[in-house]
Image (tube, rainbow, N blue to C red):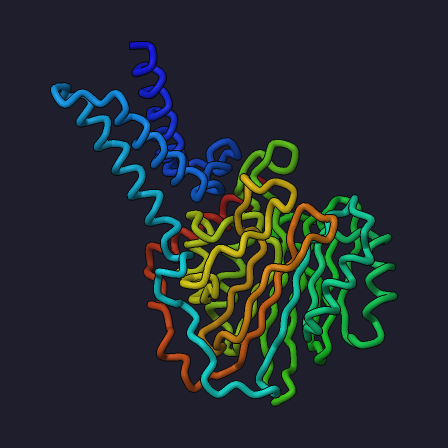
């Protein structure tokens, strides 16, 4: 009897952890459960399998409880299914790849307290990327990175900060109208501008690092979600190919990032290729993708890798994409609905109301 009570309690926990993220509240203790869907999927499956140890075929309650666990497992599985290799690709493979149309990108949250700057530099140089983005860079990190990259990367934009939200962008290709903006908070910067490709095309860049919904950072996800929605709306209206990159402090399957994709129309190269979890580099059991690269349908896939440990709590992330606008219609997403646009604008309005 005691074993069955324990097993049922385990199952109830799995059900609650599945349902909590569905609550439309932006408090951190709700939104934090958006992150571990992969772990919750296995937890729910485990609870279901273990419960059958004491399953009573004559008990109607056991049937209902088991069905509830099955429903939760299916819900969790559907959330993460698009990021498995069994799902269809969202960003299609390059067909007419040329060096002039290729853009190689490397991103790394260096972790401000990390002092293994040599590992970060070595890992970045290994990929010989055209565009480098480093986040959590204070003045110490900015000095180290500039000494290593200013030569080969003649174009850069930097805002070192001590609050773990500094960032620095290096580009091998010319940057036009590059600016630092504070989209929702005067202490949380982002970098925006246009990158001129070797073939002459301009690409709109948005480099972001919004705050996570954590009690020591931000008790609500309001600011993060508003910044994502502002970038989504700008991307939707852009007449140029778009690249959005950075540490989103959000997972790809959350309500906020899903809405970001629906509104912006940008594509996720992870879909159909794998999770490529970039956080937490220090804990194998608690890993999920936080560092993202979303791109417009003008691009095609070339390569993607998760980097090695560099002393940070994040793994670096590398991707190569090719500008192929002639094939964009084959992977174009449906335009956002009025309801989705309204939800995005409502998220932005919340930050205005809080000021």
Q: Quadrant of the N terminus?
A: top left
Horizontal and vertical percent position of residue 222: 53, 43
Residue appearing at x 46%, y 49% in the figure = 256
In the image, taking residue 243 as reference, residue 57 lies left or right, namely left
Horizontal and vertical percent position of residue 274: 46, 58
Count of numbered labels shown in the rendering: 0
Q: Quadrant of residue 280?
A: top right
Horizontal and vertical percent position of residue 301: 49, 74
In this view, the residue in front, 129 or 336, is 129
In this view, the residue in front, 239 or 306, is 306
In the image, taking residue 232 as reference, residue 16 lies left or right, namely left
Q: Residue furthest top?
A: 1
In this view, the residue in front, 294 or 6, is 6
Q: Quadrant of the C terminus?
A: top right
Q: Residue furthest front?
A: 53
Q: Is residue 41 above or below residue 86?
A: above
Q: Residue furthest left?
A: 58
Q: Is residue 111 above or below residue 333?
A: above
Horizontal and vertical percent position of residue 4: 30, 16
Q: Quadrant of residue 283?
A: top right
Q: Is residue 283 above or below residue 151?
A: above
Q: Is residue 17 above or below residue 183?
A: above
Residue appearing at x 68%, y 57% in the figure = 108
Residue appearing at x 22%, y 23% in the figure = 55
Residue appearing at x 86%, y 59% in the figure = 144
């Amino acid at each position: 009897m005691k074993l069955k009570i324990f097993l049922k309690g385990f199952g109830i926990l799995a059900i609650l952890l599945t349902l909590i993220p569905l609550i439309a509240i932006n408090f951190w203790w709700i939104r934090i459960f958006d992150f571990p869907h992969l772990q919750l999927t296995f937890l729910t499956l485990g609870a279901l399998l273990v419960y059958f140890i004491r399953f009573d075929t004559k008990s109607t309650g056991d049937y209902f409880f088991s069905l509830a666990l099955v429903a939760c497992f299916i819900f969790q599985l559907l959330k993460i299914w698009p990021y498995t290799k069994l799902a269809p690709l969202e960003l299609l493979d390059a067909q007419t790849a040329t060096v002039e149309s290729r853009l190689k990108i490397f991103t790394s949250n260096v972790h401000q307290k990390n002092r293994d700057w040599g590992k970060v530099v070595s890992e970045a140089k290994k990929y010989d990327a055209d565009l480098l983005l480093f986040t959590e860079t204070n003045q110490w990190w900015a000095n180290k990175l500039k000494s290593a990259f200013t030569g080969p990367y003649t174009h850069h934009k930097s805002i070192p900060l001590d609050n773990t939200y500094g960032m620095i962008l290096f580009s091998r290709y010319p940057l036009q109208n590059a600016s630092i903006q504070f989209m929702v908070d005067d202490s949380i910067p982002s970098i925006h501008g246009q990158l001129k490709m070797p073939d002459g095309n301009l690409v709109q860049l948005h480099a972001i690092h919004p705050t996570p919904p954590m009690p020591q950072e931000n008790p609500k996800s309001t600011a993060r979600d508003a910044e994502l929605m502002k970038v989504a709306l700008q991307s939707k209206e852009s007449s140029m190919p778009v690249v959005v990159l950075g540490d989103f402090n959000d997972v790809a399957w959350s309500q906020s990032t899903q809405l970001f994709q629906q509104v912006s129309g940008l594509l996720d190269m992870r879909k159909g290729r794998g999770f490529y979890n970039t956080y937490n580099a220090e804990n194998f059991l608690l890993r999920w993708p936080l560092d993202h690269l979303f791109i417009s349908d003008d691009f095609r896939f070339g390569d993607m890798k998760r980097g090695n440990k560099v002393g940070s709590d994040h793994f670096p992330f590398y991707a190569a994409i090719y500008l192929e606008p002639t094939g964009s219609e084959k992977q174009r997403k449906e335009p956002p609905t009025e309801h989705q646009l309204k939800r995005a604008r409502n998220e932005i309005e919340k930050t205005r109301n809080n000021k």
